[in-house]
Amino acid sequence: MKKYKFSTVRIFQTLALVLAIAGLSSCEDVIDLNTETGPTQLVVDGWITNQPGTQTITLTWSSAYFDKNPIKPVLGAKVTVTDNLGKVYEFTDKDGTGNYTWGKLNTDTLGHVGGKYSLRIEHEQEVYTSKNEIKRVPKIDSLVYTNETLPFTPDDGQKTGYIAEFYARDFAGTGDTYWIKEVLNGKTNVDKAEKISIAWDAAFGAGAPSDGLIFIQPLRRSITYDSLYQAGSHVGVELHSITNEAFYFLQQIVEQSSNGGLFATPIANIKSNVINADPNGRKALGYFGASAVSRMETVIDPKKARPED
């Protein structure tokens, strides 16, 4: 089944591996690769925040790995989010695209730190539900950039330019988890699984002695991903609070995206937090999340850059 744009490409790497091994076997038999097509499933992509403006929950149907047809939206669903105070927010698909929205640009606010939220989706006699909450998020103290010259870059991009780096301090008290996102030209830029940067307290995972500290440098610099920035670049960072459950969900996406090589494990659907009310009904894919957001942006000015490390 097609799962998420972050992980579906791995099936092609698995296919390439199978073909390479077949070629090394000196066998002339034709090998037919039969990929099983399972039942169509609801795919949920929804993440509410404490930021003002439109909130969106996207519903689509899953499809086979090699299906080249456009992804089909789920139409005619009833989608609501209810907070812990009993207020109900109705999400509507005004354009018939499967993008169910609530609120207006830069006005209404749905999420609040400490709030708990329940998602309910009704479609074709099936009811799906999910729950999440908005955790605290630290303030970003500063956003700096350093002039760097690299011996090489993974995508053969710019070798001379600037590495952006943010500074923030984790809250005291273990178990805070975060999603760090690059902001480029005013928009968050997470178009690959490899770009997903997550933190447990101020480090990569649970168990590190990082509680209450400034985020470690690899995390601070994770917003500079594809290539070095140039003078005049409009760059920034968003720090999203997430639950521990969301941390592990995103971690699995990253692991599957890098699951290649001779010892790769079979790709499997990542467990969703969206549950069908009927235990015998079709299971859902995807995730319903909630975050508080800290954000900071800047324009790279060579006169204000820090010297190369």
Image: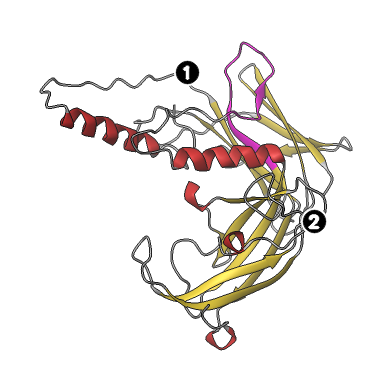
Viewer-side residue, 25 vs 257 = 25
Residue drawn at 71 percent across, 63 percent down: 214
| Element on which disc 1 rests | loop
Start and end of the magenta stretch?
271-289
Crowd rating for badge 2 (residues with CA inside 10 Å; few <14, some 14–19, many 20+)? some
Q: Amino acid at mark 1?
A: Pro
Residue lying furthest right:
85
Q: How many marks?
A: 2
Snapshot quadrant of residue 160: bottom left
Residue drawn at 50 percent across, 40 percent down: 255
Q: Amino acid at mark 2?
A: Phe
Do tag 2 and tag 1 residues touch (Cβ < 8 Å)?
no
Q: Which x, y percent locates residue 9?
A: 39, 39
Residue named by callout 1:
39
Which labelled disc corresponds to residue 171? 2
Q: Which x, y percent locates residue 124?
A: 61, 19
Is residue 65 at least partly visible in the picture?
yes
Q: Is residue 194 above or below residue 120?
A: below
Residue drawn at 69 percent across, 45 percent down: 207
